[in-house]
Amino acid sequence: MEPKPARVRILDAAHELMLTVGLARTTTKEIARAADCSEAALYKYFESKEELFVRVLAERLPRLTPLLAGLTAEPGQGTLEANLTGIAREAALFYEQSFPIAASLYAEPQLKRRHDDALRALGAGPHRPIEDLDAYLRAEQALGRVRADADTFAAASLLLGACAQRAFAYDMTDTGERPPVDAFAARLARALLGGISVAPTRA
């Protein structure tokens, strides 16, 4: 079997290390070693660990950003309920997988500040999905499928906030299990639609 290209090996190694030891403790040296390449080779493909983190989120986790971009580019497709259910499902899975990677940063405030500064320079960060969902809802609003007086930013924040909370809020329950993602996404979408849709949700 033909070996994987270096860039793919680096992303695979970064994803695995970030999941197992956390972003704060993952170094480019360890990533390069796990990818069986030199640290200099790693920097041929990625400028920094922060860029690697962004690429891991974009290429190894559920594809939330492309979904939002596609819906915003062509609003009016499908039903709002189906679209919001799909968004909620991808978001819930995205946060479920990204939370263990990024959580270690919160234990090291100085490192988190440096990481945040680097993400700002890359035009990335946890605010972007909210802005992207807000943009999609405003596009649907312009078509008349979302109420003219609806607060699209608040709606986006509510939906994605609930999806993010699902990633960590259920660890202390008796079972430690998260709500099943498909039913969770459908319930969120229907609850949100009750406040913003011009059409009644299906019974």
Image: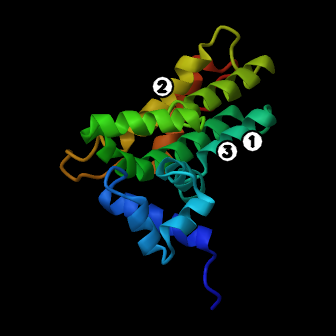
Point out the image quarter for the N terminus: bottom right
Q: Left or right: 28 with respect to 122?
A: left
For the image, the number of numbered tags is 3
Res. 70 mark: 1
Location of residue 52 with respect to 41 vertically, above or below:
above
User: Mark 3: which secondary structure?
Assistant: helix
Which of the two residues, 94 or 198, is positioned nearer the viewer here?
94
Residue 67 circle label = 3
- Which residue is painted at 62% across and 13% down in the image? 150
Q: Amino acid at mark 3?
A: Leu
The kind of secondary structure element at disc 2 is helix
Nearer to us in this view, 64 or 54? 54
Gap in Å between the C-alphas at discs 3 and 2? Answer: 18 Å
Q: Are marks 1 and 3 in contact (CB under 8 Å)?
A: yes
Q: Position of residue 174 (x, y in %)?
A: 18, 49
| Disc number for residue 158 | 2
Give the Cα distance between marks 1 and 3. 5 Å
Question: Within 10 Å of the Cα at label 1, are there few (<14), some (14-19), or many (20+) other Cα atoms?
Answer: few
